[in-house]
Image (cartoon, rainbow, N blue to C red):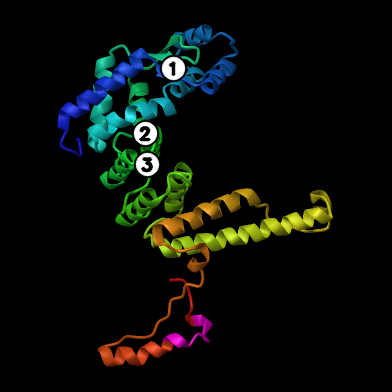
Amino acid sequence: MAKGNNGQQALLALAEELCVLLADGLPQDQATLDAVLAALGETDARAAFGLLAADPDSAEHAPLAALLLSPGPDALCALEPALQRADLDAAGALALAEAVVRRLGDGRVRALLPDGSRAEIPAGPAGLRAFVRRLRPESTAPAELLGILARRGGAGLAAGLAVDLAVGLRHCRLDWTPERVFFLGALLERADMAQDDLAGLAAWATGFLDACGLPFAPRQALARRRQALLAQLRQAEALEEALARGSYEILMSQGLRLAHVHGPDARAELALLERAGQLVLGLPGQALDGLSRRDLGRAEDAEELLRLLPGLEDDDNPEDQGES
């Protein structure tokens, strides 16, 4: 149920906190409210919510009710400390959803609108279970990473940023292997709070780790991604040079085909990657290049090993080279 030592008491306390939030009003941003009003062809929020309540299960209304029951950034940050205290596993997450369904009874919850007013959201058992599922209560970040955020918070990391980072870790959907925990932990521990964009670095790192897959070797993965980004930048520069000589339509009519790469995005990611390499491995960007793997054979004893080592000086055979 609970992965920590809090047990059933923590689960019930979390269920109570969720129910209080839903009864008091789940915060809605203006973009969500505008989307609901536009979909229903209404300009008045109360009229729109009345239409939803009248027929909540229709094909038109059910997706809108689900949208309103999706926790936004404010709700996620407000609930993160309680989610961490409960530290539930998959079975605990299911039990939490059922506890919320039992406590709310009729399944009607309230939305807190941007102007401070409140309106009812139709939410049956399925909707409430989906709300709890979107919180990902079973995906609390590893204790090692949360400990780093707590220590850095005590050293001056803004409390709001620490919670934002914990929410990001909860929702990044990574399987936490020791290598991934090491990489992200080193980055969070060593980043300069005065100079680094810690939120940007963490968001990039979780996406990078997900894209790399498993098994994960930090130096090799950084080197491969750096080379890919440099290739993208060369493509972007080639396109910029070509466009300086003629319009895109003229170049197309002449048979020129160039992949479109958004240069600023590639440069921004390259900067984040190289900063991560410095923080995690202590290596500047160029030091990641030129990695090679050589098969020198098998040594049975020290004398045989010494005989094989001079082979490292032979770099003439490209077939033996590759990334390591």
In front: 141, or 54? 141
Image location of residue 185, percent across then percent down: 34, 51
Q: Is residue 71 visible?
A: no
Q: Residue at x 43, y 44 (%)?
A: 193
**Disc sitting over residue 159 in the figure:** 2
Task: Please tell me whether residue 263 belongs to the stretch shown in magenta.
Answer: no
- Please tell me in which quadrant of the rendered image residue 311 appears: bottom left
Q: Is residue 192 above or below residue 241?
A: above
**In the displayed structure image, the side of residue 292 where residue 5 appears, left or right:** left
Q: Earlier in the sequence, mark 2 or mark 3?
A: 2
Kindly report which numbered mark, 2 or 1, lies closer to the viewer in this rendering: 2
- Looking at the rendered structure, the secondary structure element under dot 2 is helix
Kindly report which numbered mark, 2 or 3, lies closer to the viewer in this rendering: 2
Q: Is residue 188 above or below residue 71?
A: below
Q: Residue at x 34, y 13 (%)?
A: 23
User: Cα distance, mark 3 to mark 1?
Assistant: 33 Å
- Looking at the rendered structure, the secondary structure element under dot 3 is helix
- Please tell me in which quadrant of the rendered image residue 106 appears: top left
The residue beneath circle 1 is 57
Q: Is residue 304 above or below residue 237?
A: below
**In the displayed structure image, the side of residue 82 where residue 130 appears, left or right:** right
Image location of residue 97, percent across then percent down: 28, 26
**In the displayed structure image, the side of residue 119 where residue 104 appears, left or right:** left
* Magenta-highlighted residues: 312-319
Q: Earlier in the sequence, mark 3 or mark 1?
A: 1
